[in-house]
Image (cartoon, rainbow, N blue to C red):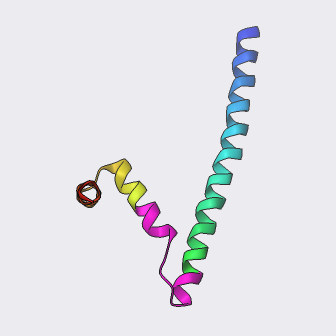
């Protein structure tokens, strides 16, 4: 019984921490996209969406990311 209670407390703690960290990350991503929309509407170049795309391609390992890295290393 003591072990079940201990595991339950750890599980609730992980859920609480995950929700706090996850919600902060979602707010950050949403704010970044909103800033890019405002920049695009004012005729400026987007900043955050290209960075997020490069990060996602880096995690996935897409062809464009590999090409980008080759070009980056040449500079």
- 59 vs 4: above or below: below
- Residue 7: x and y in percent read 69, 19
Q: Residue at x 47, y 81 (%)?
A: 45
- Residue 62: x and y in percent read 27, 55
In the picture, measured across the screen, residue 62 lies left or right of residue 50, that is: left
- Residue 41 on the magenta segment: yes
Q: Main secondary structure of the magenta part?
A: helix
Residue farthest toward the front in the current orientation of the protein: 75
- Residue 9: x and y in percent read 75, 24
Q: Nearer the viewer, residue 9 or 26?
A: 26
Q: Nearer the viewer, residue 21 or 36?
A: 36
- Residue 22: x and y in percent read 64, 48
Q: Quadrant of the C terminus?
A: bottom left
Q: Quadrant of the N terminus?
A: top right
Q: Residue at x 29, y 58 (%)?
A: 72
Q: Residue at x 73, y 31 (%)?
A: 13
Q: Is residue 44 visible?
A: yes
- Residue 69 on the magenta segment: no
Magenta residues (range): 38-53
Residue farthest toward the top in the current orientation of the protein: 2
Q: Is residue 1 visible?
A: no
- 73 vs 29: above or below: above
- 57 vs 35: above or below: above
């Amino acid at each position: 019984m003591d072990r079940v209670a201990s595991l339950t407390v750890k599980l609730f703690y992980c859920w609480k921490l995950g929700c706090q960290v996850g919600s902060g990350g979602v707010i950050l991503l949403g704010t970044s996209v909103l800033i890019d929309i405002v920049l695009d509407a004012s005729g400026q170049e987007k900043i955050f969406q290209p960075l997020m795309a490069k990060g996602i391609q880096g995690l996935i390992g897409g062809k464009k990311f590999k090409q980008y890295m080759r070009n980056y290393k040449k500079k």
